[in-house]
Amino acid sequence: MDALPNGQHGCGHDVHMAIGLGIAEILAKNKESINGTVYFIFQPEEETFVGAKKMIEQGLFSIINPDEIYSLHVTALPVGQIMVKPNEMFAYQKRIRIKLKNELSKEEVKGLTRKMYSSLSRSQLNSKPWEIQHMSDPKIGLMNPNTIFKDYMIVDDKFNIYSEKDELF
């Protein structure tokens, strides 16, 4: 799978909605056999956590009190295959801005960005967690306790560097 432009992860929010509505329709047709109440929560801005935080801050869980929550995220798996993982797994991206005094040479700036990249990036040795086709691999995928997806952070190595007056961004 090729990388998507501008850090986009392109999971297909329209697909999320279609799947959710399809599940709701099936459950509604079988509501006599379901004990309890089923809520469908469609989280806005899931890539940034802003949507979930807003939903919580606006009191969603004082209105509903679910016993369990299941989430969905579309990713590249073979047709007909789904993957389930307890606890957390999410897509997330965040931009950081660093402001410095503009006293560095171009070479020092290049060295600093290389150092930031290697310090901030986190993944297991020889893994490429951004290659999502590995998610279902039995040796390194999500279902293996030693998965390469356990603890990682991907940092874009294309830093936007510019100076303004006597500050470097």
Image: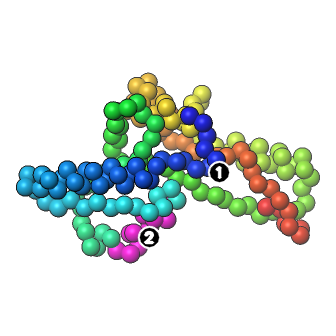
**Colour scheme employed for the rendering of this structure:** rainbow
Question: Which disc, if any, is residue 15?
Answer: none
Q: Residues within 10 Å of mark 2 (few under 14, many from 20)?
A: some
Q: Which residue is mark 2?
A: 54
In space, the residues marked 1 and 2 are separated at their CA atoms by 25 Å
Task: Please state the extent of the stretch shown in magenta in the rendering.
Answer: 49-59
Image-based side of 35 in relation to 51, left or right: left
Image-based side of 34 in relation to 122, left or right: left
Q: Which residue is mark 1?
A: 6
Q: Give above or below for 133 relative to 92.
A: above
Give the number of the mark in front: 1 or 2: 1
Residue lying at 21% horizontally and 59% vertically, measured from the top left: 38
Q: Residues within 10 Å of mark 1 (few under 14, many from 20)?
A: few
Q: Position of residue 92 (x, y in %)?
A: 52, 52
Quadrant holding the N terminus: top right
Residue lying at 36% horizontally and 49% vertically, measured from the top left: 72
Q: Position of residue 59 (x, y in %)?
A: 34, 74
